[in-house]
Image (spheres, rainbow, N blue to C red):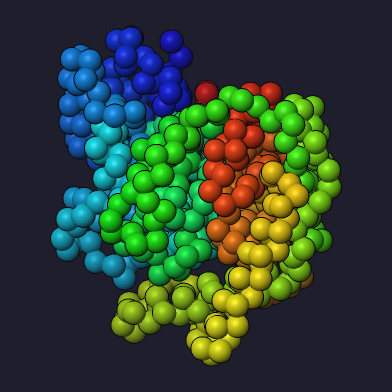
Amino acid sequence: MTDIALKTATELVDLFAQKEASPVEAAEASLARAHRFQETLNPFVLIDDDSALAAARESEARWQKGEPAGPVDGVPVTIKDLVYTKGWPTRRGSTAIPEDQPWDDDAPVTARLRESGAVILGKTTTPEMGWKGVTDSPLTGITRNPWNPEKTPGGSSGGAAAACAVGAGALHIGTDGGGSIRIPAGFTGIFGHKATFGRVPAWPLSPFGTIANVGPMTRSVTDAAMMLNVIARPDWRDWYSIGNDRNDFLDGLGDGIAGLKVGFSPTLGGNPVEPGVASAVAAAAQKMADLGATVEEAEPALDPDHVTDVFLKHWFTVANTVVNSFDMAAQAEMDSGLLHIALVGSQYSMQDLVRAETARREIGFAINSFFQDYDLLLSPSLPLPAFDVGILAPPSDDPGRTWINWTPFTYPFNLSRNPACSVPCGLVDGLPVGLQIVGRHYEDNLVLRAARAFEAANPWELPPMATA
């Protein structure tokens, strides 16, 4: 048996059921990798061996009796440090949040994973308050890409992505307010899914409101579907949540995409894309056609500059509110980039925000209109491969460039609330490229089905350091 830490969650559960491996063995292997890669990649803000091994022993006892607690019993998981985890601090990448306070609550996703018997290894890194598309913070420093530690893993769920790619856990909770699951999934060559807004309950609700989501990051599409079956259960604390629709995300997962009508947008309205990425994504679109879908170039009626402006007003205004909830002493220690966008956000009026919300509805209408003619939309997840760590954006002639300028494919679907995923589709200069698949509201199953069909026909690699 190859290193058990690199098994998928689906494989682990089968091994546990057949008594060919134990949750303790899986936890020990995952913890060993967490510690091994912490120094070089810095994916974790907290690793708790004692708690994880205690949970693994309890899981092992249940499997010995043939009475697993749920679908992911014994599977090693991690939680992003924006998400409450009882007994551990949730500091959101910020020194402004004191560690010494009661931490008495689990977020809905954490609670559902515990109830299902998952073994929580620790908490993964995030930029301060999850504000940007790379992962570094005043609290934890720089998190790095396992394909090349001199490159960023993306953000804001960069710690989860890096841990996932090297086998430090099979299932990982990320959050996505503008691409924060799909950006690091694209940069690190894993799978990440932003579900339809409200599908996965969240509490406390993100200050970024109805553009913010919680979801799975995994090394296989099947694992993400299995994880969604656990974490998409309703929770009364999230009054936005869809409720219990009894959806099974594994249902029909292997049915393929023959007969589907798919729109392929290479630039989503004219956004620049690096040639190597464009080529890899075009080849992925052709692969979807080879699998039986009707694929043609088409895109929603969106003006990229307008979409960026609408998202910016939502994001920067809330950033201002978040920053100003702290006193001046705390603000003095915050990420200077976060302080800058908060300052910009302070200059918007209430009318600006109301107009942006109205424009957001029009963006949603345009995307809904597109899906009257197409079952799915394909695009690049990102217009470029991972760039150097320690900077907010790749080098540019525009000194005011921020993370929003190089992520034009992800945040439109936060505004519109559509399900969207990133699936690996190749390498450019030794760095992963992601294919984004977007679906209609509530059709997460179809997005996952398409991703699974592509994955089956185009298996992806793990970083060399993960298998060395």
Q: Position of residue 97 (x, y in %)?
A: 29, 67
Residue 82: x %, y % from top left: 37, 57
Q: How many marks?
A: 0
Residue that appears at 25% across and 23% down: 68
Give how far across and how far down residue 158 sits, in percent. Answer: 49, 49
307 w.r.t. 386: above or below? below
Question: Is residue 330 left or right of 225 when viewed as pictured?
Answer: left
* Image coordinates for residue 302, horizontal then vertical, percent: 74, 65
Q: Along the horizontal axis of the image, is 14 left or right of 69?
A: right
Asked whether, in this view, residue 50 is left or right of residue 357, the answer is left
Q: Quadrant location of residue 305?
A: bottom right
Q: Which quadrant of the view contains residue 22?
A: top left
Whether residue 159 appears in this view of the structure is: no
Q: Nearer the viewer, residue 130 or 107?
A: 107
Kindly identify the residue that appears in the image at 78 percent across and 55 percent down.
Answer: 299
For the question of whether residue 349 can be seen, the reply is yes
Q: Image point 71% across, 52% down: which residue? A: 372
Name the residue nearer the viewer: 29 or 355: 355
- From the image, which quarter does the N terminus lie in? top left
* Left or right of residue 261: residue 54: left
Depth check: give the residue in front, 190 or 208: 208
Above or below, 157 relative to 405: above
**Which residue: 63% across, 64% down?**
364
